[in-house]
Amino acid sequence: MTVWFDDTHRARWYETAQSGRRGAPHRYSDMAVQCGLVIREVFHLPLRALEGLMRSIITLLGVE
């Protein structure tokens, strides 16, 4: 499987507004959530499998 993201999508992966709390989890942008849901529908993945796949994609993109 090949997934292509341009630099504008990588820059918008996380929500821009930070909660300001130390240790608070990242908030993903609507674009990132929609990307995951499209991949889920195409490959008929359960949510737990989608979570693992999206973690791998995030690691490969280098956005963490």
Image: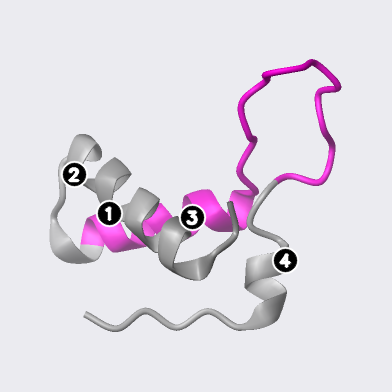
Location of residue 41 (image quadrant): bottom left
Looking at numbered disc 3 in the image, what kind of residue is underneath it?
Gln
Q: Answer whether residue 21 is magenta in the image.
A: yes
Looking at numbered disc 4 in the image, what kind of residue is underneath it?
Ala
Looking at numbered disc 1 in the image, what kind of residue is underneath it?
Leu
Mark 3 — residue?
A: 34
Residue 14 place in picture, x, y as percent: 67, 49
Looking at numbered disc 2 in the image, what kind of residue is underneath it?
Ala
Horizontal side of 27 relative to 49 (left or right) equals right
- In depth, the one of 63 and 27 nearer the eye is 63
Image depth: mark 3 or mark 4 in front:
4
Sequence order check: which comes first, mark 3 or mark 4? 4
For label 3, the crowd category at 10 Å Cα-Cα, with few meaning under 14, some 14 to 19 and many 20 or more, is few
Q: CA distance from mark 1 to mark 2?
A: 6 Å
Q: Quadrant of the N terminus?
A: bottom left
- Asked whether the residues under the numbered discs 2 and 3 touch, taking CB atoms below 8 Å apart as contact, a structural biologist would say no
Is 46 situated above or below 10?
A: above
SS for dot 1: helix
Mark 2 — residue?
A: 49
SS for dot 4: helix
- In depth, the one of 60 and 49 nearer the eye is 60
**Numbered range of the magenta stretch:** 15-41
- Asked whether the residues under the numbered discs 1 and 2 touch, taking CB atoms below 8 Å apart as contact, a structural biologist would say yes
Mark 4 — residue?
A: 11
Mark 1 — residue?
A: 53
Q: CA distance from mark 2 to mark 3?
A: 16 Å
- Asked whether the residues under the numbered discs 4 and 2 touch, taking CB atoms below 8 Å apart as contact, a structural biologist would say no
SS for dot 3: helix
For label 4, the crowd category at 10 Å Cα-Cα, with few meaning under 14, some 14 to 19 and many 20 or more, is few
